[in-house]
Each structure stands twice: as structure tokens, then as C-alpha cells.
Amino acid sequence: MAVSKVFLFVTAMAIIFELATARNITVGSPGGSWDLQTNLGAWAQGQTFDQGDDLVFSYDPSQHDVLEVNKANYDSCTTSNPIATHTSGDDVIPLSTTGMRYFICGKPGHCGRGMKVAINTVASSGPSPPGTPVRQEPVTCTQRWPPELDWGWPSFWPFKLI
Ligand SMILES: [Cu+2]
């Protein structure tokens, strides 16, 4: 009994740890964005993308979009036949697998003017450095069951006899 409780606790802590280390990484931030001004290549160089993180493209959808493409189309800024197209202006892309992924803006001329970013996702490297925003799931308490084990009047009884 005691052993299984310890096991449950360790498992729960491992799950909480995993949730706490998954990050939302907004492209270009801080100080930039998914736009024509930000040096996205330099931005990506300064980042580590861990498996399990979410990549967020936040932009004005009337100005830009996001196309995920293969390397050849990334290099040549070819917007036809993308792997995926995102147009919401607040696109969340889970980095669920390791390896390279390529994103360009599909608006005419934007990729050629530098609106492109290559993301190298690596296997999760453990805890985030201090100050890194973390995505935390709300913790819910489960009700104890059975709720009343002690002898005596149930709590819903309207009056006490003694
Ligand atoms: Cu654009």
C-alpha cells in the first residue's frame, strides 16, 4: 500500500514536471514578431526548441500568413504546395517531433524579404531556465471518497438531537 502511494506520487510529480516544462514560444518575441522587420534567422539562432513546446505565430492576418513548407521550398521561397497553411493570426503549432521544420510567409515577396524561419526541435532537455514562461495546467482537487467515514450525524441533517 505504502509503495503504491509513493509510486503514484512520483508519477504525478513526473506529469506535473512535464507540463511545467512545456513552453509557448512566440516567434520573434520579445522585441519582434512574425513580420518584415524582425531578423527571424537571428531570433531562431538564440532559441532552443524542445520537443513538446508550442510554436506560436502572432501577427495581423490581413498582412501575413504562415506556410509550413519543405526545405527546398523554404530555400527558394516557393509558396505553392505547402505542407500546412495557417491564417488565424494566432497560430499555435505543437512541436511534437524532433527535427527541422520550415515556415515562410505566403504573402507576395515577404519570404524573399526575410519572412522565413527554420525551427530545429530537439529532445526535451529538462527544466526550463529561470524566467522562462511556463504553461501550467490548473490543478484540480479530487473529492475524497467516501466523503464521510466518521460515525455521527450526516452533515446534511437539519438539526442535532444532542
Ligand atoms: Cu508576411
Image: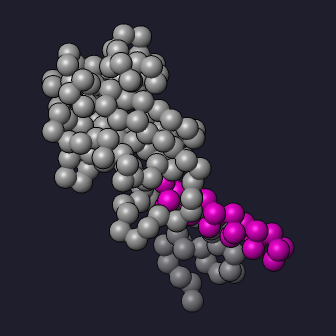
Q: Quadrant of residue 54?
A: top left
Q: Main secondary structure of the magenta part?
A: helix
The colour mode here is one colour
Quadrant (top left, top right, bottom left, bottom right) of the C terminus? bottom right
x and y percentages locating residue 159 in the rendered image? 50, 78
x and y percentages locating residue 17 in the rendered image? 56, 63
In the image, is residue 63 part of the stretch drawn in magenta?
A: no
Residue 60 in the image: above or below residue 129: above
105 left or right of 53 in image: left
x and y percentages locating residue 140 in the rendered image? 50, 61
Residue sitting nearer the eye, 13 or 58: 58
Residue 37 in the image: above or below residue 126: above
x and y percentages locating residue 26 in the rendered image? 32, 46
Q: Quadrant of residue 135?
A: bottom left
79 left or right of 119 in image: left
Residue appearing at x 56%, y 84% in the figure: 161
Residue sitting nearer the eye, 123 or 20: 123
Q: Is residue 33 visible?
A: no
Residue appearing at x 39%, y 42% in the figure: 55
Residue 97 in the image: above or below residue 69: below
Residue 64 in the image: above or below residue 129: above
Q: Quadrant of residue 40?
A: top left
Residue appearing at x 36%, y 60% in the figure: 133
Range shown magenta? 1-22
In the image, is residue 21 part of the stretch drawn in magenta?
A: yes
| Outermost top residue | 80
Q: Is residue 154 visible?
A: yes
